[in-house]
């Protein structure tokens, strides 16, 4: 018989140590966080970025903030108004493509295109909140210096430049009235601030958590050593202390950035399709499926998370390449378990990032004052059973530390949080 009668999916997963123990993962992430923040940045995998800001003690009132949200392929802008009660109105919303997507831009062209995109908001406010969701170092005056763009954005001259300062110069050349301030932040900080703005109880602390194409978090760090109390951004996807399976090592070599973002490659939406595909290739090598199913699976040259998710939700849809490939019910059951293990592991890594941050917060010690985790990300909300699994892992692990938390989300969270940042003095 072609397939291995003695190899179950469970045995295959165990053979390759594909599913790690959650406490082993978050302890390593926490160790790496503290290396980057307090000890030796050169030995840390993940960056721990200072933001130099704290959430405001009170909601902004009687203020208008121009909001820019630049991340991935989309560029969004709007005007947010806080009335006398602090209630929010979003107006003048527009969405276009991110500068540098279609062709490479010079520094001048990059900031000129951003100015073109927001010229319709000219003089409607004197403060700008700018969510710039790319790796950057924050300055003490609220500006940001990009140190890398994702591969879609082609603007190499912008790396190392002050984004706010350059945009302000461009706007002033267009006769905008004096812009008092442009505050840079990333999406995790915006999520955290949105949690603060929409909180309906007295939380002890706040976390912003993004689980989409990438995976990152932000939290409020207490004063410790030479670090003042402030929001810290964790580039969690870069953590290099986690255990990697042979499957992960093989996948890494096939990516555009081998050796970089090891944690992100294990679980983020940008890589889960590749993880599923690599699992199948290793399963084929171990003769896990019947000959006919193996031949059909070999015809698949790549997989998307969307295709995996469709299969996990409905294995009978013959338009899906995975469903079409399964000749027997046994093969279908094996493939379902195999790909579900990738989601299970993604939940472990997502929960581990949050556990490390929850421990680092050093709050949530009372049921009456839990830590609020504001969640964002298409992968988190749309991937089959991912969010409930993360919560189940968190519930089990937080009990060990007597940490109390609540998951939260809200509409237009990134826009709202960015406006809050723009209003911070």
Image: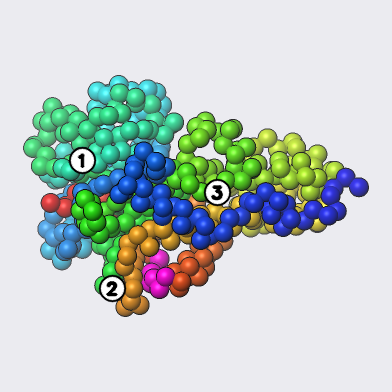
Residue 121 within the segment the image draws in magenta:
no
Say which residue label 1 marks. 139
Relative side of 219 to 72, left or right: left
> Disc 3 vs disc 2: Cβ atoms closer than 8 Å?
no
- Pinpoint residue 148: horizontal percent, then vertical percent: 36, 33
**Comparing labels 3 and 2, the label whose residue is closer to the camera:** 3
Are there few (<14), some (14-19), or many (20+) residues within 10 Å of tag 1?
some
Say which residue label 3 marks. 243
What range is drawn magenta here?
Answer: 401-407
- Pinpoint residue 94: horizontal percent, then vertical percent: 31, 43
Q: Is residue 338 above or below residue 282?
A: below
* Residue drawn at (88%, 45%) of the image: 2
Alpha-carbon span between mark 3 and mark 2? 38 Å
Q: Is residue 147 above or below residue 377?
A: above
Answer with mark 1 or mark 3, whichever residue precedes in sequence. 1
Please identify the quarter of the rendering in which residue 325 is found: top right
């Amino acid at each position: 018989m072609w397939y291995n009668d003695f190899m179950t999916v469970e045995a295959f997963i165990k053979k390759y140590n594909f599913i790690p123990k959650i406490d082993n993962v978050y302890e390593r992430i926490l160790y790496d966080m503290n290396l980057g923040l307090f000890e030796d940045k050169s030995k840390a995998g993940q960056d721990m970025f200072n933001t130099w800001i704290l959430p405001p003690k009170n909601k902004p009132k009687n203020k208008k903030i121009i909001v820019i949200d630049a991340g991935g392929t989309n560029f969004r802008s709007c005007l947010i108004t806080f009335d006398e009660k602090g209630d929010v109105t979003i107006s003048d919303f527009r969405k276009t493509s991110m500068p540098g997507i279609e062709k490479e831009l010079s520094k001048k062209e990059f900031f000129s295109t951003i100015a073109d995109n927001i010229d319709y908001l000219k003089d409607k406010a004197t403060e700008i909140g700018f969510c710039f969701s790319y790796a950057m170092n924050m300055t003490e005056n609220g500006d940001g210096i990009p140190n890398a763009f994702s591969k879609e954005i082609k603007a190499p001259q912008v790396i190392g430049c002050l984004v706010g300062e350059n945009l302000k110069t461009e706007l002033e050349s267009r006769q905008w009235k004096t812009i008092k301030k442009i505050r840079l932040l990333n999406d995790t900080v915006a999520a955290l601030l949105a949690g603060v703005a929409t909180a309906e109880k007295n939380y002890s602390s706040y976390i912003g958590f993004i689980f989409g194409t990438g995976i990152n978090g932000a939290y409020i760090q207490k004063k410790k050593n030479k670090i003042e109390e402030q929001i810290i951004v964790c580039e969690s996807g870069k953590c290099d202390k986690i255990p990697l399976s042979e499957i992960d090592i093989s996948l890494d070599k096939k990516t555009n950035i081998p050796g970089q973002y090891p944690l992100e490659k294990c679980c983020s939406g940008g890589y889960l399709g590749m993880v599923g595909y690599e699992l199948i290739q290793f399963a084929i090598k171990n003769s896990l499926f019947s000959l006919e199913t193996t031949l059909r699976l070999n015809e698949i040259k790549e997989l998307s998370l969307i295709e995996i998710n469709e299969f996990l939700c409905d294995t009978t849809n013959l338009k899906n390449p995975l469903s079409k490939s399964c000749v027997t019910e046994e093969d279908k059951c094996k493939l379902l378990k195999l790909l579900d293990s990738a989601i299970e592991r993604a939940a472990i890594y997502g929960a581990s990032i949050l556990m490390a941050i929850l421990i680092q917060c050093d709050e949530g010690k009372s049921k009456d004052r839990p830590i609020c985790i504001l969640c964002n990300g298409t992968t988190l909300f749309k991937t089959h059973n991912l969010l409930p699994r993360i919560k189940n892992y968190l519930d089990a692990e937080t009990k060990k530390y007597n940490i109390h938390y609540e998951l939260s989300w809200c509409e237009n969270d990134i826009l709202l949080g960015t406006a809050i940042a723009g209003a911070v003095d």
